[in-house]
Amino acid sequence: MPEYTQQLLRSLPKVDEWMHKLAPRFAVPLLLIKQVVRDEVERERQAILSAPDEAKIHSEGEWAARFAKSLRRKSQPRFRPVINATGVVIHTNLGRSPLADDAAATLAEAGKRYSNLEFNLATGKRGSRYSHIEDILLDLTGAEAALVVNNNAAAVLLALDSLAKGREVIVSRGQLVEIGGSFRIPEVMAKSGAKLVEVGSTNRTHVQDYQQAIGQETALLLKVHTSNFRVIGFTAEVGAADLADLAKNNGLLTMEDLGSGSLIDLSRYGLPREPTVREVVTAGIDVVCFSGDKLLGGPQAGIIVGKEKVIEQIKKNPLNRALRIDKLTLASLEATLRHYYQLEDALENIPTLAMLTEDGLAVKKRAVRLLRKLRPAIGDRCRAAIIPALSRVGGGAMPEYSLPSFAVTFELTATSGTPGAISPNRLEQDFRALATPIIGRIEHDRFLLDLRTVREDEIALLARQIADYFREWP
């Protein structure tokens, strides 16, 4: 090994020595400090061995700064709140639907205290965790019985495993979709033990297609929401009522996976018409399943409602225990569902519904308030403007529909002395790196902060972080 390489290796910090130097400066566990020092020293060692000509001997100050930066990064929680300024309301990557304030408070209370999760306060004996929300779901959907598992994929899997294992399930070919995370209906069906029977064509399926496919091994007729996939133009599909009638006449069960699901008709607020859960139940479908954290605006959950005899069969499946919800989900879901007893209460207090139905001018007023807070701080260093924008519903619901919105854009002015120094991509990256990350979007070579998905109580924090960011530029 060349002498210079050996010299570089000998200059590397000693782990124990630096542990004692750093410990008084950082209120973090000694084990974390040890791991950080080891990682940084090993990283430098590998760099020296792979390219010694490019390496150098670092000063004590340089090592101290390097260790400090790594410690701050490693001691910061990985799971962090962010400000969603993308304009996508139900943003899967950002946690889908934010909870209502009281639902979040109920969740926190359930987490830090004991509860009557499976304890009947009236009898003093063991109870059912589902009893806390089943009656509410029956009131809101008109179903005879209900069950909740940990997400909608689990709901589909559990229902198919319970009702059609080893038998045939008939599905329209146009509904065999793949959604986020490579979730494919045929693969879930195969995992449940049910046998897939495709009918119709990609764009058109009729009642007679189902009728001709029914045989002695048929157990279930399944209807699936196509989520963020659409076939438009020359199309046809069988409605819930017609499918239920066909199944009843043939002694079969029906099931509909509504995907996002909705307890209210959002078309009255200008959004596209989607069947509500109550409408599908009323149509006669035996089992209906949908998500809790999409249009419903609650926590991640898979909700199953339908005929009592059928739901009881699903409840008895041993797989149900593996897929059941925990106390945190239960607490926040109950709080969310209770808002739906009064429509105006739900629209005002459930953030997802509030964002979806908010008037565009109200969004613009929020953008104006943001600029008012920013201008004294950024002065002539940056040009900020409000522009019309289009938000998205997100979450696989209403994929072709846009919501009129307003966004704020930023660019350095010529007087800043650094024209062109901040590209849209650089802004997007830098804003993601802030203490509370700000997630925007790039559109037409501009970085946008869409205010439809920014809460009123986030404006002050948003303005403070942006102002501090631009103050650091020369």
Image: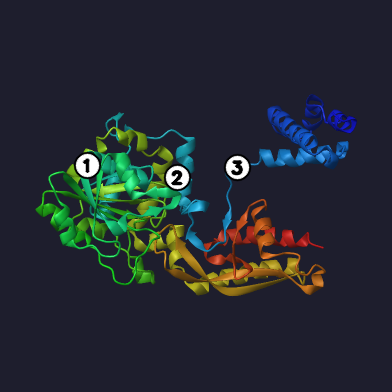
* Distance between the alpha carbons at the discs numbered 3 and 1: 40 Å
In which quadrant of the rendered view does residue 26 lie? Answer: top right
Task: Identify the image quadrant of the C terminus.
Answer: bottom right
Query: Where in the figure is residue 449, as x and y percent of width and height?
Result: 60, 65
Per the rendering, the mark at residue 78 is 3
Binning the other alpha carbons within 10 Å of mark 3 as few (below 14), some (14 to 19) or many (20 upward) gives: few
Q: How is the image coloured?
A: rainbow
Residue appearing at x 32%, y 40% in the figure? 191
Name the amino acid type tagged 3.
Arg
Name the amino acid type tagged 1.
Leu
Q: Is residue 215 left or right of residue 179?
A: left
Query: Where in the figure is residue 155, as x and y percent of width and height?
Result: 32, 45
Query: Where in the figure is residue 355, as x and y percent of width and height?
Result: 47, 63
Looking at the image, is mark 2 or mark 1 nearer the viewer?
1
* Residue that numbered label 1 is attached to: 163
Looking at the image, is mark 3 or mark 1 nearer the viewer?
1
Using the image, determine if residue 81 lies above or below residue 314: below
Query: Where in the figure is residue 144, as x and y percent of width and height?
Result: 20, 48
Count of numbered badges drawn on the protein: 3
Secondary structure under tag 2 reads: helix
* Residue that numbered label 2 is attached to: 106
